[in-house]
Image (spheres, rainbow, N blue to C red):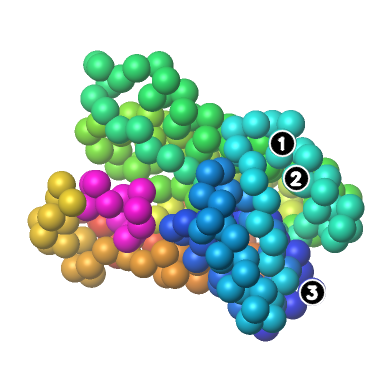
Amino acid sequence: MRLANRTALVTGGSRGIGRACVRALAEEGAQVAFVYHSQQQAADALAAELTAQGHAVQALQADVANYERAGAVVAQLLESWSSIDILVNSAGVIRDGLFATMEPDQWQQVISTNLTGTYNYCHAVVRSMMSQRRGSIINISSVAAEFGSRGQVNYAASKGGIDALTRTLAKELAARKVRVNAVSPGMIETDMSEVVRGLAGDQLKTIIPLRRVGQPEEIAKVVTFLASDDASYMTGQVLRVDGGLSLGSY
């Protein structure tokens, strides 16, 4: 197992890509904690399932937009674990709407969760990772950062910020042996993308060269790779995992 004796923290771990990441990291041997916002039943079920399988997994409630709560979560884990080796920032929301009629709350919710939430947890773990001179931070971005769609100005802006944060933070932390990378998914089969997939219908598959949407587990496998020593010479990268969607029509 590639992540034996490692500790990992995942945000947004109760559903979608985050849930798949929790499972994949645990199956690779990591001790995993994950935070969830409101889906306590799903979070408890995931933690119980993986614990029953012999994995060390725990769920913690937190709003990732809350800076103080991020610090408290990390402090609690450092007290019990002594180190956090892997951070996966997966928590995210969408509040789509045309920009001309977009309310401030639609903008703020997306920026606060997606971008500020990523800042909060990076900031909470970074000093301990620098002190231990090891760590891997993986941020979940989106191809929307480069190829935004109508009605997603807020979402695209939040993910573009994550890409910039990833590259710049990687430069700052490289000397301390802390790696920072991002995964940029395309259309993935999650509850968050359900409305968009429904509106696009069968047309969606015609614009994806691999002719299908992706699965959360396919993103989680790339995250696990970046968390492991197999990616020891990679930092500051934003890896597209989109079935070729970003290549455009062909």
Q: Name which quarter of the figure residue 146 lies in.
A: top left
Q: Which element type, helix, strand or loop, lies under badge 1?
A: helix
Q: Amino acid at mark 1?
A: Arg
Query: In 3D space, how far apart are the residues under numbered discs 1 and 3 (Cα atoms)?
Result: 26 Å
Q: Name which quarter of the figure residue 63 lies in.
A: top right
Please tell me the numbered disc located at residue 73.
Answer: 2
Does residue 119 sit above or below 101 in this rendering?
below
Query: In 3D space, how far apart are the residues under numbered discs 1 and 2 (Cα atoms)?
Result: 6 Å
Whether residue 79 sits left or right of residue 125 in the image: it is right
Q: Amino acid at mark 2?
A: Val
Mark 1 vs mark 3: give the one in front: 1
Q: Position of residue 114 (x, y in %)?
A: 50, 38
Judging by the rendered image, the residue that carries numbered circle 1 is 69
Q: How many marks?
A: 3
Q: Position of residue 139 (x, y in %)?
A: 56, 50
Residue displayed at 15% across by 47% down: 199
Crowd class of label 3 (few under 14; some 14 to 19; many from 20; radius 10 Å): few
Query: In 3D space, how far apart are the residues under numbered discs 2 and 3 (Cα atoms)?
Result: 20 Å
Magenta span covers which residues?
187-197
As rendered, which of 54 and 137 lies closer to the eye?
54
Q: Contact, CB < 8 Å: mark 2 with mark 3?
A: no
Q: Which element type, helix, strand or loop, lies under badge 2?
A: helix
Q: Quadrant of the N terminus?
A: bottom right
As rendered, which of 121 and 76 lies closer to the eye?
76
Whether residue 126 sits left or right of residue 187 in the image: it is right
Whether residue 132 sits left or right of residue 185 in the image: it is right
Q: Is residue 237 visible?
A: no
Judging by the rendered image, the residue that carries numbered circle 3 is 5
Q: Quadrant of the C terminus?
A: bottom left
Please check the rendered image and state whether residue 196 is part of the magenta-colored stretch, yes or no: yes
